[in-house]
Image: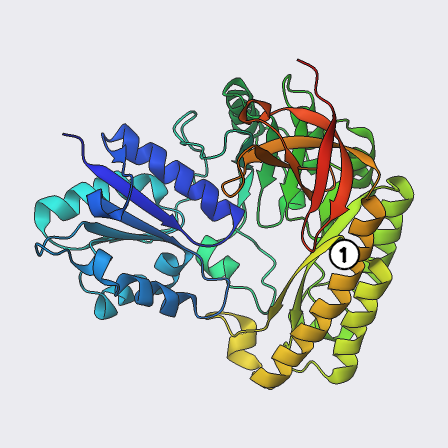
Amino acid sequence: MARKYLIETFGCQMNVHDSERFAGLLEQAGYEAAADLSEADLVLLNTCSVRERAAEKLFSRLGEDPIAARVDGSRPVIAVAGCVAQQEGRAILRRAPYVDVIVGTQAARQLPALVEQALASGRAQFDVDRYEDVSFPLGVARRGDPVKAYVTILEGCNDHCAYCVVPSTRGRERMRSKADILAEVQEAVAGGRREIQLLGQIVNDYQAPDDPACDFPALLEAVDAVRGVERIRFASPHPRHASERLIAAIRDLPHVCKHVHLPIQSGSTRVLQLMRRRHTREDYLRLVDALRHAVPAVAISTDLIVGFPGETLEDFECSLSLVAAVRFESMFSFKYSERPNTLAARRMPDDVGGEEKARRLAALHDVQREIQMEGYRAAVGGVFDVLVDSVSRRRAQEVAGRTTGNVVVNLPGRREWLGRTLRVRIVGAGSNSLRGEAAEVGD
């Protein structure tokens, strides 16, 4: 009987795709996916360390009875992967000695061998070495989404923003070859995926190692030309790498979505300098103007941190005014929390109190909520192309999809519509999504 695995994933889109790769590697090694924790012979926790108290959340999860032990005293093999594994390494074993395998962010392909070594030896195995090879065997990843496919184009980051743990957990920037990327896109489309999401810590810093003429805009052109690709998204670009050629690609390439997730992190130039973001508030606003001049309907979303060390009330007001000026379609906002091995943790005291951070975050949410609702209400009565990408778990005969601007639309529909792009008339606006009706369906 085949052994069974269960993967729990925390964090970003890249972690989700890493878990798809882990699943494929395990299935290659003879494992099958478990329906639930009770039947798993191997439990893999794929972790993220970007958010607050990531290590503590891991240890809390590890301490829960269903993982630590079963009623009969047995337990599954327990593996920890991802950024917390890379960050903590062998130290995980001091607090959770029953962990069997620790696999770092650059050692994914070692997972099956490490599991076998742990089973054979009865001792914990770990690999947090930094491997330079970012290629991955084609067709191995077990994609969990029937409509969208994640494709990693680069790993790591060289920017070392003061708050960011990624350079220490993901390593320095390493590019995948253009040939590997296009082969994976073609494989994903052949498997029925209609939307390609290109991933990288700073995705628009891409430069093909096998084609000196291929930068990120050129890669977008190449992916856009792959037959069967209907939509292309990418995350996340850095404002200082957003060139005129990238803006032109968003404008001109028919399959590139008219949506850009463009992290700002703070509306204050002074705080941006403390963060080592290497751009100013004015740079960002000029970029937004250029995007909207070239692509009037472009949707812009962002990330924003409140309470970074040294952020004054005046600095925070700059963030509020920037949000009001740009009018983001959506925003991910967070209270600053100290991350290990970062410049801010080493040199900058966390001097904005927890209550004040919470107050600032709430004020930011209030501003963004009203902007977002105004945009949603303005969409009512309009007709948009919606790629249906999921079936409702709560309502029978309802599906959901996204506009090219990345807005979720819920509508009555059939499972057979999954993967189809429909013309949808918007009939209502909620706080986080729109409601629509199919304007035309066809066969």
Q: Is residue 159 left or right of residue 256?
A: left
In the image, farthest residue toward the right: 293
Q: Is residue 309 visible?
A: no
Q: Quadrant of the C terminus?
A: top right
The residue at 66%/73% (across/down) is 361
Instruction: Residue at 68% x, 77% y: name it.
Output: 360
- Up-down relation of residue 321 to residue 372 (above or below): below
The residue drawn where x is 71% and y is 45% is 434
Q: Amino acid at mark 1?
A: Gln
Q: Quadrant of residue 83?
A: bottom left
Quick check: 399 above or below 432? above
Q: Is residue 148 left or right of residue 108?
A: right
Q: Nearer the viewer, residue 81 or 208?
A: 81
Give the image quarter of residue 371.
bottom right
**Point 15% across, 48% down: residue:** 118
Q: Position of residue 227 (x, y in %)?
A: 64, 16
406 left or right, relative to 36: right
Relative side of 85 to 431, left or right: left
Q: How is the image coloured?
A: rainbow
Q: Nearer the viewer, residue 213 or 247?
A: 247
Q: Quadrant of the N terminus?
A: top left
Please name the residue that numbered disc 1 is placed on: 372
Residue 366 visible within the image = yes
Q: 51 or 93, which lies in front?
A: 51
Coordinates of residue 410 in the picture (x, y in percent): 65, 40
- Nearer to me, 169 or 383: 383
Helix, strand or loop at disc 1?
helix
In the rendered image, the residue lying farthest to the top is 443
